[in-house]
Image: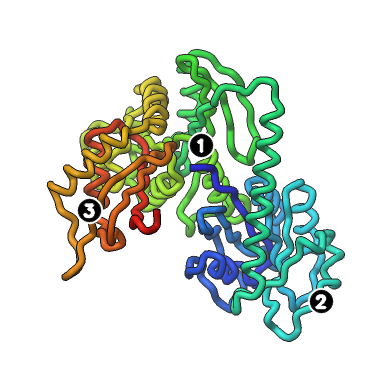
């Protein structure tokens, strides 16, 4: 699974960013209202498995509390994204703040598209009124989130620009005389004050050799390269992510995009939970983002030196994270160094599991045993008939099942098949993905 590029939409309030995201995602994800400032936090959608679109909170009037940190917000969004969409209301003349947003986006050196939304309205202004923003005419798009006009063309150009950038990066990497060995990336993910920075520092002390340590590759992300058993591991210490309603104004409003970027960049994510606090829906949501991105996952319980009954913590974790039973749990303490070295061992094991490939003959034996043990149910006169299975990819492992009427397979049977594969194969710590295709689609 390749890293999906991040496309960020920035602009002032009431430009129609949320409506445009819903139109591009083809479903209602962002809340839409006539009032300005309905979007208060980032809304994220994966578009056709080709890029991730982030709808950012709109920048408000000077009297609003957002004004004090507008520059920080823009810089943070621009820094994390691979491509930037500057969204404007096409019925209004741009002002100095619109010009500042466009200027900062262009200075980043990243691709910038100007999206003139609400083009279906009669008082939409001509393109000449927006050329002073400095964005090339071929990168200016009129769109209407209401009618869908221009949205398809915009998405086509976004994909084309992303593909062009990826090809250039590949050409640059081929030109090197020697290619560096794969650096395994481990991201520390979790809420604020859960102990990420403490664990980050402790990991630096427990490894065999520090390669480098640097800060500021992306805002509020510390990076450190260590070497463990001849494997170089880059550790990313991310900013803490609070519940949406508790995020402070300013740069913390953009912590979601930094966390998302770290998840996408990493090979394995350590989800940190505090032993002294109850687990929250935010912890579960972060785990879901990690799994959806196809990354390896470890649940790391911090501050265990402050509690007496760790068995109760394990019981809670088993209940709260029952959707990822394959994720290993490590009880750690940065104060005492408990199990920190074990975390390195797990990272190495999970990376090996992510690359593991199963023989086709073994897979079909597992499939046959699953069908015999629990025949898949169907409709009155039709029953799904899985025939054979192959592995088509790794990192994460990906399996394709061929057969007849597989669209009738119930989700519970798919989960049953996953359990059967995990019983036979070493896939601890990694999600495994499935595609189900009728033979006529082969």
Q: Does 151 appear above or below 305? A: below
Residue that extends furthest to the front in the rendered view of this protein: 440
According to the picture, the residue beneath numbered tag 3 turns out to be: 413
Query: In this rendering, would 378 be left or right of 134?
Result: left
Instruction: Choose between 211 and 95: the one closer to the eye.
Output: 211
Query: In this rendering, would 66 be left or right of 326?
Result: right
What residue do we see at 18% from left, 45% from top? 370
According to the picture, the residue beneath numbered tag 2 turns out to be: 126
Q: CA distance from mark 2 to mark 1?
A: 44 Å
Residue that extends furthest to the left in the rendered view of this protein: 373
Q: Earlier in the sequence, mark 3 or mark 2?
A: 2
Q: Quadrant of residue 362?
A: top left
Residue mark closest to the camera, 1 vs 3: 3
According to the picture, the residue beneath numbered tag 1 turns out to be: 266
Q: CA distance from mark 3 to mark 2?
A: 55 Å
Where's residue 205, x and y in %? 49, 18
Q: Earlier in the sequence, mark 2 or mark 1?
A: 2
Q: Dot 3 lies on which element?
A: helix
What residue do we see at 62% from left, 50% from top? 251
Where's residue 121, x and y in %? 69, 83
Q: CA distance from mark 1 to mark 3?
A: 31 Å
Q: Do the CB atoms of the residues marked 2 and 1 lie less than 8 Å apart?
A: no
Where's residue 234, x and y in %? 54, 27
Where's residue 137, x and y in %? 81, 63
Instruction: Choose between 182 and 327: the one closer to the eye.
Output: 182
């Amino acid at each position: 699974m390749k890293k999906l590029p991040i496309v960020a939409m920035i602009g002032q309030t009431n430009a129609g960013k949320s409506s445009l995201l819903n139109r591009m995602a083809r479903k209602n994800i962002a809340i839409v209202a006539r009032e300005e400032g309905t979007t208060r936090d980032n809304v994220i959608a994966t578009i056709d498995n080709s890029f991730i679109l982030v709808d950012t909170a709109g920048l408000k009037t000077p009297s609003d509390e957002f004004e004090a940190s507008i520059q920080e917000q823009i810089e943070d969004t621009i820094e994390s994204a691979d491509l930037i969409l500057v969204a404007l209301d096409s019925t209004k003349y741009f002002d100095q703040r619109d010009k500042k947003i466009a200027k900062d986006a262009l200075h980043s050196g990243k691709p910038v598209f100007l999206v003139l939304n609400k083009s279906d309205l009669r008082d939409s202004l001509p393109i000449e009124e927006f050329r002073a923003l400095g964005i090339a005419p071929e990168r200016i798009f009129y769109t209407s989130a209401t009618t869908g006009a221009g949205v398809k063309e915009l998405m086509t150009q976004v994909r084309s620009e992303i593909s062009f950038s990826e090809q250039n990066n590949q050409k640059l990497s081929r030109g090197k005389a020697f290619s560096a060995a794969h650096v395994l990336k481990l991201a520390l993910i979790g809420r604020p004050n859960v102990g990420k920075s403490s664990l980050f520092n402790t990991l630096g002390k427990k490894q065999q050799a520090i390669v480098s340590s640097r800060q500021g590759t992306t805002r509020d992300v510390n990076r450190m390269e260590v070497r463990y058993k001849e494997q170089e591991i880059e550790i990313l210490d991310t900013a803490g992510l609070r519940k949406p309603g508790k995020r402070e104004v300013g740069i913390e409003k953009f912590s979601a995009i930094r966390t998302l970027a770290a998840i996408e960049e990493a090979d394995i994510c350590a989800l940190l939970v505090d032993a002294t606090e109850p687990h929250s829906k935010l912890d579960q949501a972060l785990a879901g983002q990690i799994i959806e991105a196809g990354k390896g996952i470890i649940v790391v319980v911090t501050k265990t030196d402050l509690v007496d009954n760790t068995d109760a913590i394990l019981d809670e974790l088993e209940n709260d994270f029952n959707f990822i039973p394959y994720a290993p749990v490590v009880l750690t303490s940065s104060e005492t160094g408990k199990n920190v070295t074990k975390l390195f061992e797990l990272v190495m094991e999970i990376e090996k599991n992510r690359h593991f490939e199963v023989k086709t003959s073994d897979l079909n034996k597992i499939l046959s045993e699953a069908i015999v043990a629990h025949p898949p149910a169907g409709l009155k006169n039709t029953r799904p008939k899985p025939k054979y299975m192959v592995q088509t990819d790794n990192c994460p492992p990906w399996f394709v099942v061929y057969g007849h009427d597989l669209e009738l397979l119930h989700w519970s049977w798919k989960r049953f098949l996953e359990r059967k594969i995990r019983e036979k194969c070493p896939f601890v710590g990694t999600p495994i993905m499935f595609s189900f295709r009728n033979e006529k689609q082969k």
